[in-house]
């Protein structure tokens, strides 16, 4: 992960159970690949949103996702999924890119947005808690 920008790349290989009869990855599985990179970026900066919830009562549901399919992934393709934190003040926005390992071809771009919600009241906050912002921004 880069120290200047919060970025993390995971390397994966398309398993048989992710493809349809013509060996193309089903569109919904791309969100799973995004989630693996998103989880890894949080792990690498030491941010455990579940423990933060237990301590503070805040949950961070995904409120929006966007995906652009450019080139299909196929069975046994090796690829990288890179997650980059784009914003962490009012919501957590993470951008994603999926590229083939063999030629760096861009296959998919996307983003996810998460908001802070106080539980059990289910009240959405207008800003991400400061502790989370600091963790996502890193040292100044």
Image (cartoon, rainbow, N blue to C red):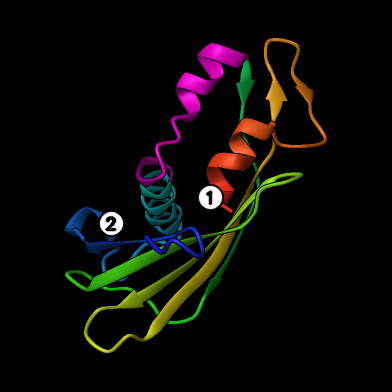
Indicate the quadrant containing the C terminus: top left, top right, bottom left or bottom right. bottom right
The x, y position of residue 58, in whole percent, is 63, 21
Q: In the rendered structure, find residue 12 and report the number of the disc placed on it.
A: none
Q: Residues within 10 Å of mark 2 (few under 14, many from 20)?
A: some
Q: Is residue 119 above or below residue 125?
A: above
Q: Which residue occupies the extreme front position in the image? A: 140
To which quarter of the image does residue 37 belong? bottom left
Kindly identify which residue carries mark 2: 18
To which quarter of the image does residue 66 belong? bottom right
Q: Is residue 114 above or below residue 27?
A: above
Residue 137 magenta-highlighted: no
Q: Is residue 23 visible?
A: no
* Tag 2 secondary structure: helix
Q: Which residues are magenta?
A: 42-56
Say left or right for 36 vs 114. left
Residue 49 magenta-highlighted: yes
Kindly identify which residue carries mark 1: 139
Q: Is residue 14 visible?
A: yes
Choose between 107 and 23: the one closer to the eye: 107
The x, y position of residue 38, in whole percent, is 44, 49
The x, y position of residue 131, in whole percent, is 61, 31
Q: Is residue 111 above or below residue 45?
A: below
Q: Residues within 10 Å of mark 1 (few under 14, many from 20)?
A: few
Real-space Cα separation, disc 2 to disc 1, in angstroms:
38 Å
Disc 2 vs disc 1: which is toward the camera?
1
Q: Identify the residue at image location x=58%, y=60%.
A: 111
Say left or right for 42 vs 68. left
Q: Identify the residue at image location x=43%, y=43%.
A: 42
């Amino acid at each position: 992960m880069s120290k200047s920008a919060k970025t993390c790349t995971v390397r994966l290989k398309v398993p048989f159970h992710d493809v349809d009869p013509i060996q193309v990855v089903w569109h919904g599985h791309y969100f799973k690949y995004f989630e693996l990179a998103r989880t890894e970026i949080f792990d690498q900066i030491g941010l455990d949103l579940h423990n933060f919830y237990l301590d503070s009562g805040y949950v961070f549901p995904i409120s929006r996702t966007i995906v652009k399919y450019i080139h299909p992934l196929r069975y046994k393709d090796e690829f990288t999924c890179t997650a980059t934190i784009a914003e962490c003040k009012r919501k957590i926005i993470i951008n994603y890119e999926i590229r083939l390992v063999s030629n760096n071809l861009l296959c998919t771009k996307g983003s996810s947005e998460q908001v802070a919600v106080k539980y059990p009241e289910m009240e959405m906050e207008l800003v991400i808690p400061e502790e989370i912002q600091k963790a996502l921004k890193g040292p100044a």
